[in-house]
Image: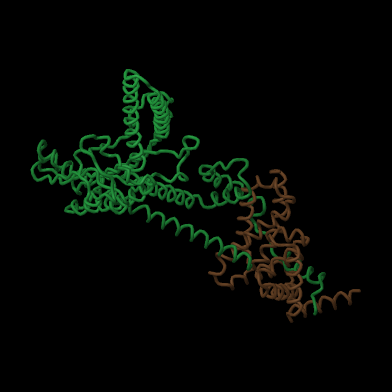
Amino acid sequence: MEQQLEEWLAEGYAVSFRTACLILGNQADAEEAVQDAFLRAWRFRDSLTSVPSIKPWLYRVVVNSCYSKLRREIPHRDRRTGDEALRDVASVDGDPATVAQRSEVAQTVLEALHRLPVSLRVPIVLRYYADLSERDIALAIGRRQGTVKSRLHEARRRLADDPSIATLAFDAASDDSEEA
Amino acid sequence: MALLDEDTLGALLHELGDSYPIPSSGEADTLRRAQRGAEERRVVPEQITFDLGPGAGPGAGTVRRVIRAHPRLVVAASLVVVLALAGAGVLWTNTSTPPRVTAGSAVAGRAPAHSPATPSRAGNQSEHSATKGIASPSSAGAAQGPAFSASNPDLARTPTAAAPTTAAPNPSNLPNGTIGQPARIEQTGSLDLTVPSGALSSTMTKLVDLADAYGGFVANMDTQSGSLTGSTPSGSVTLQIPVASFTSALNSARSLGKVSQLTTRATDVTGQYVDLQSRITALEASRQQYLTIMAKATSIGDVLAVQSDLDGIETQIEQLQGQLNVLSGETAYSTLTATVSEAGAAHRHHHRTPVATTSGWTKAWRDSLHGFAVGAEGLIRAAGPALFALLCLVALVFGGRLSWRRLQRRNL
């Protein structure tokens, strides 16, 4: 079980880190949260024998670390530090036009995502980025499956009502149809 | 109601998420640090983890997590609990020790039918001195109390025929010692009372009044002023209280001062009582037969012989009847002996001896020790409630914090 956890932590680091980035909106916080989550996961690895599945368990640990960050540290800090992530996003690609476009999309999506309350943001990130099933999300956030379903529905409704996301979605759909 | 397409949402989030670069430290470094950190942090919890046992239940995991997460807090809480328990124990000991209460019961009697019918008082520990005793004014009246005979100590305590035999204990409240007979219980009690200085006389009067109030009488009263001997004024009074009112009278007497010692004893004399009754019945039957024989006697010699035997039988009957009356009186009235002393007696005795025999240094040392003991006692007495309040506060803070965190987590 220890070996299995080690492998999973190694493989799941990237997705855990990026999930934390989407939830927290800040790379440094996400890195600390994942570090803390891995520490907890390794410390409580003995309890892995009693969990049905390792993946939601680990996501639960990551989400709890993010919750702790959101509750304890981030409220006392300047929210604008979240922009740091977008500068990093911008530095990924060398083409200025593409960089600018991707930066704009990332900015828009991130802002829309962070306009959602955390209770809606976490399920939607876990569902549409981490690709967890509703059942696994329920295990990860410690809520009933019905609650997860309703939260996902509410989050999608709110995002659809967000004009910036609606524009992006329309553009994406137009690109797809042109390509088709 | 419009909903965002799942595929579009997934694509947007994947695009955003994947655009975050993985930190240079990477997963290997994070994993290594996590493993190292976990091993380092494991040292402390293992030292203070309590063995909750294999069947500790579903809450055991939570307790372990709390212990691991807040080791210092748990140690502090444990310390507070231990101190609070110790304080409570000391308080409890202090409040329960001073009045040394002993209660005893003895079963006398159940003697064989032909055992000698001596008026033994098995288990009776109180001293009766009815010959020297003084009766209270009310008990001197024929209607209220029994009369006394100064010539016979036993009969002195025997109520006359007018004395209410119904004053015997309520049979429904007592165990039946013999079939068809209510249990005959002889109850005695003694208590030592300490009263404030100058309150001896009034307390003695109240004790005497107690006897009147419960339909009893004063069997003995002795008061020492202590002016000649230099000792503390004290006194003792022996009350005879109807058995049914004994407990109430005892409680009333206890409320008159600080009880330093209380002893009660109950002795079952049903066997003796029944034995005496049966012997009297048998002797009366013999007497009746002798009377019949005497009526049929024709010669003077026969009459004289029968008369002699008849006299002997009647003497025996009278003796046994007397013993039966004594026993009835003892079971109808309980004896309560109260010794009253004024406060400061122990203190004065305690200090008088050292002053006479020891030097000033020793006295100072003893006073110092005494002061230390008093101070420590006061501190412990005050620490109990304070620690209890602190414990409640800690529990409240813990509970509030836990609830708050749960509420916040639920709201997230």
Answer yes or no: is residue B229 visible: yes
Question: Chain B's colour?
Answer: green
Q: Residue extending furthest top? A: B301
* A9 or B322, nearer to the observer: B322
Q: Return the residue found at the far front.
A: B298
Residue lying furthest bottom: A163
The structure residue drawn at horizontal position 64% and vertical position 53%, both measured from the top left corner, is A38
The front one of B20 and B384 is B384
Name the residue at 30% across, 35% down: B125
Q: Colour of chain A?
A: brown
Q: How is the image coloured?
A: by chain
Foreground pick, A123 / B211:
B211
Of the pair B327 and B409, the residue shown nearer to us: B327
**Residue B122 in sight from this viewpoint:** no
The quarter of the picture where the C terminus of chain B appears is bottom right
Q: Is residue A67 above or below residue B220?
A: below
- Residue B260 image position (x, y, % from top left): 28, 44
Q: Please count the marks in the image.
A: 0
Question: In the drawing, does residue B52 fall left or right of residue B19?
Answer: left
The image shows residue B195 at horizontal and vertical percentages of 22, 51
Quarter holding residue A70: bottom right
Left or right position of A166 against B202: right
Which percent across, then down, holds residue A3?
71, 43
Quick one: quadrant of the N terminus of chain B?
bottom right
Q: Which residue lies at the image location 45% right of the left edge and 40% below the top edge?
A: B182
> Where residue B354 sits: x, y (%)?
13, 38
Q: Quadrant of residue A136?
A: bottom right
Position of residue B240 relative to residue B394, above or below, is: above
Q: Quadrant of residue A26?
A: bottom right
